[in-house]
Amino acid sequence: MATQTKQAHAYPGEYRSAPTAHAALKDWLAAHPDHELRHPHPFDVSRSDIYLEDRWQPIFAEMRAKGPLHYVDESPFRPHWNVVSHKAIAHVEALPDIFSSSWEHGGITILDRADDVAPGEEFELPMFIAMDRPEHTAQRRTVSPAFTPTEMKRLEGDIRQRTGALLDSLPMGEQFDWVEKVSIELTTQMLAILFDFPWEDRHLLTFWSDWAGDTEIATVRELDQQRQEILREMGGYFAQLWADRSNKEPGQDLISMMLHSDSMKAMPPQEFIGNLVLLIVGGNDTTRNTMSGIIHEFHRFPDQRKAFEEDASLIPNAVQECIRFQTPLAHMRRTATEDTELFGETIKAGDKLVLWYLSANRDEEVFDDPDRLDITRENARRHLAFGYGIHRCVGARLAELQLRVLLEEMHERCLRAQVTGEVERTRANFVHGFRKLEVTLEKF
Ligand code: HEM
């Protein structure tokens, strides 16, 4: 895996105001000529250093002030439209026939298939997140029964018991890494339970889903190669699991449910495995990074932590607000299937549109004082962190349940996590989160 870079954390007071951000970015680029070569456009927000260094906020604010869409003609990720307002992103996602998610058109992230991959060399697993209607509808239907309110009720006891046990095992008054000991452990355990994944191998889930989480890689070509290697490895492991599970009595786990459902029986193994991989990657570092984000933001906004400590009834809304604030997937991508007009701009068939959820969730047209965490915010639920429309996250209820239980169990134990050590963020323009968050626990 890529090596990690340690980076001092920047606090909101250090952000520059939107009108000066453009100039500030230009200064920064002047001091970093290598980056200038690779990202010459000041609104090329595909550059991962702005997420690593947590200084993306004023850049997006300036873009929003100028308009909902910005075309970047030169970028390592090839020309693309950046869609930055809440309204424009919801609009694009509400028109899935014009703005496609399908892999054939370009897929769901800013990263294209590398130009120089020879035909037949690339390895792709079909996943319904990268399909359009009608295939998407049929495949999504096979997994959505695993995420109904009734299923969530069934899982809640187990999640609560494991969360409580983990919290009870943590050292008091001693510094440790929250990402490693809590966020990774809880989300990995959860997926292992959901899939009845071999317990002793559960840490592979974390390793596999990290390919998108740290992109300190020299070229887009290398990034794509790494992605393909990991997909191959995951594909092989799941093919074996699928074969083993087919010969057993159906259990209550998601693999058995999928394997024995009528609609899935007709599915080719490659597609079945692709969808399993999707559920694992989708549910892993997204929820994990929100678990770290909550602790980080409570530390930055101690009045909000106090409000939580004094009133447990705020927890459900706090979960929504923390998801809005963290936005663990910075973007999704669509590709235009026809020429069309969008908010006064002419979009050509084949154009790539990058939907920056990170920006939508700080849109001052929708959220008052958007760079402030406010767990009593009335419209926190309007965040777009789970996307919008037919592809809206199928695992949203499970993620919300895990986060709510974590806060409830911390409240129950009067546990407060103070950030006392290093904070290290991911160098990535897709997964938005933390590599390390050193904390010390105390009682409130
Ligand atoms: C789709 C975010 C947790 C499984 C998505 C999308 C986003 C997202 C942005 C794409 C929406 C779009 O294209 O419009 C998140 C966040 C999570 C989270 C922020 C946690 C805080 C989970 C969990 C699972 C999961 C726990 C499953 C265990 C999926 C799947 C899709 C998806 C299967 C594809 C849905 C489709 O294409 O119809 N998620 N996710 N996610 N997510 Fe999540």
Image (cartoon, helix red, strand yellow):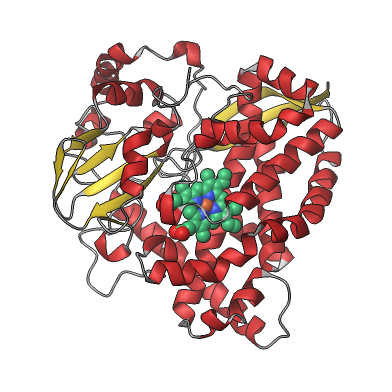
Residue name at image x 32 percent, y 56 percent: 96
The residue furthest bottom is 247
The residue lying toward the viewer, choosing from 133 and 309, is 133
The residue lying toward the viewer, choosing from 124 and 322, is 322
Residue name at image x 71 percent, y 32 percent: 315
The quadrant holding residue 26 is top left
Residue name at image x 40 percent, y 59 percent: 227
Query: x and y percent of residue 287 in the render?
Result: 60, 45
Q: Is residue 260 above or below residue 47?
A: below
Query: x and y percent of residue 348 in the render?
Result: 13, 50
Query: x and y percent of residue 274 in the render?
Result: 47, 70
Specify the quadrant that holds the C terminus: top right
The quadrant holding residue 375 is top right
The residue lying toward the viewer, choosing from 218 and 106, is 106
Q: Visible in this render: residue 282?
A: no
Give the side of residue 68 with respect to residue 157, left or right: left
Q: Is residue 319 above or below residue 217?
A: above
Query: x and y percent of residue 381 in the render?
Result: 55, 36
Number of marks: 0
Residue name at image x 80 percent, y 48 percent: 160
Q: Visible in this render: residue 137?
A: yes
Give the side of residue 271 with respect to residue 203, left or right: left
